[in-house]
Amino acid sequence: MGPRALIDLAALRHNLQQARIAAPHSRVIAVIKANAYGHGMLRAARALAEADAFAVARVEEGVALRRAGVETPVLVLGGFFDKEELCVASECRLQLAIHQAGQLQQLQQAVLSHPVSCWLKVDSGMHRLGFPVSRAAEAFGQLQKCRSVAPPVRLMTHLANADDLADNSSTRQLQAFLPLARDLGAEHSIANSAGTLGWPGARSDWIRPGIMLYGSSPFLNSRAQDYGLQPAMTLQSKLMAVNHYPKGAPVGYGGSWRCPEAMPVGVVAIGYGDGYPRHAPAGTPVLVNGRRAPLAGRVSMDMICVDLRAQPAARVGDPVELWGKGLPAEEIAEAAGTISYELFCGLGTRVEFDEQDG
């Protein structure tokens, strides 16, 4: 009776193709960090096998891919923390983002089983990770001379506000980064999902689509279908009870929501203990038997309540969709004051995962 996340492998492949259509002259690094945004990293790696490379956040994620037999190039976006991780990355043939001087120094001192491929991370304006543009050429030269580094050395940067097409900070970042890449003659990567779909100047040698692969829009106030994307995850559960209450009856913790009339209230077997957002307010939609029904009252750990006035015939066991093919995750995220990334990544261990292909 508990919740189930159905992952559509065909949708993952379709969304990868949409990335290629958007940037036909770029190679694709499919971002499958954080357990493929909650979709299952190994599952996503199989479905996205046509990608030119994968990206993860941490060395241990790359190791897991190698142990599963994945031979596609893997870029570790966070680089490495210490000598031990550097040696593991070398043994597993992982590519590394180099974003600070300490990493560069460790590379220069290391004796590795295999030289590692490196991407120099440049801070073009996000001010999170990376070498300042003013110091990037020097660091690039040091990487080129380092015996522990396999050629070619590549460049990368990350756009801070690409999800807002009206914000010109992405233009400023491109203006800071592109001359450097041109002067160094280096292959480079700029575009995340938003950069791939919305910023032509960011579609360089390599793109790094993430959220778009999972069928969610990277832009503010938009939906996946606006960009030809298909949701890869459908979160489902069932009605576990249907009750009838009089006008004025309080529903849920705190009694903050009261029945506006005598009415049926459904109880759905999912809650914040499963990853459904606790801050989703009353009125947030779900689909009961494919039709919209609004939340009634607060989200509990194991249950939510829904207003069934529009579906008086609903019964225990009827299917409920929380987000997915029939109900955009972006809409639920907006209602809860968050983003679809967090919804996907936040699913709990009680959620059962299944696959379909088309």
Image (cartoon, rainbow, N blue to C red):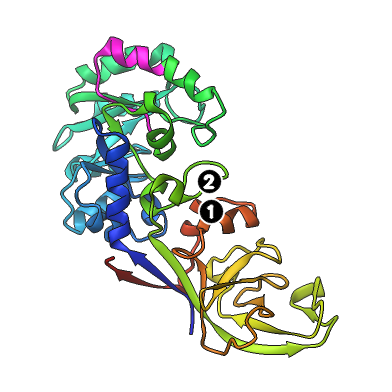
Q: In this view, does 182 lie to the left or right of 254?
A: left
Foreground disc of the pair 2, 1: 2
Give the structural element (helix, strand or loop) at label 2: loop
Whole-percent x and y of residue 257?
A: 79, 72
Indicate whether 168 appears above or below 21.
Answer: above
Q: Does the magenta stretch include residue 173?
A: no
Q: Is residue 117 visible?
A: yes
Structural crowding at the residue carrying mark 2, measured as other residues with C-alpha within 10 Å and reported as few (<14), some (14–19) or many (≥20) = some
Q: Which residue is drawn at 18% across and 24% down?
A: 152
SS at mark 1 in the image: helix
Badge 1 crowding class, 10 Å Cα cut-off, few under 14, some 14 to 19, many 20 or more, is many
Residue designated by label 1: 330
Looking at marks 2 and 1 on the same chain, the residue that comes earlier in the sequence is marked by: 2
> What's under tag 1, amino acid-wise?
Glu
Q: Name the residue under label 2.
A: 222
The question of residue 182 being in magenta is answered with: yes
The location of residue 63, given as percent across then percent down, is 25, 51
Badge 2 vs badge 1, beta-carbon distance below 8 Å: yes
| Mark seen at residue 99 | none
> Is residue 226 placed above or below 208 in the rendered structure?
below
At a point 65% along the width and 86% down the height, the residue shown is 312
Give the Cα separation between the discs numbered 2 and 1. 8 Å
| Residue that extends furthest to the right in the rendered view of this protein | 248
Question: Magenta span covers which residues?
Answer: 177-191
The quarter of the displayed image where residue 283 is located: bottom right
Q: Position of residue 284 (x, y in %)?
A: 65, 64
Quadrant, the C terminus = bottom left
Of the residues shown, which amino acid type is indicated by label 2? Ser
What residue appears at the point 47 percent right and 58 percent down from the top-left corner? 344
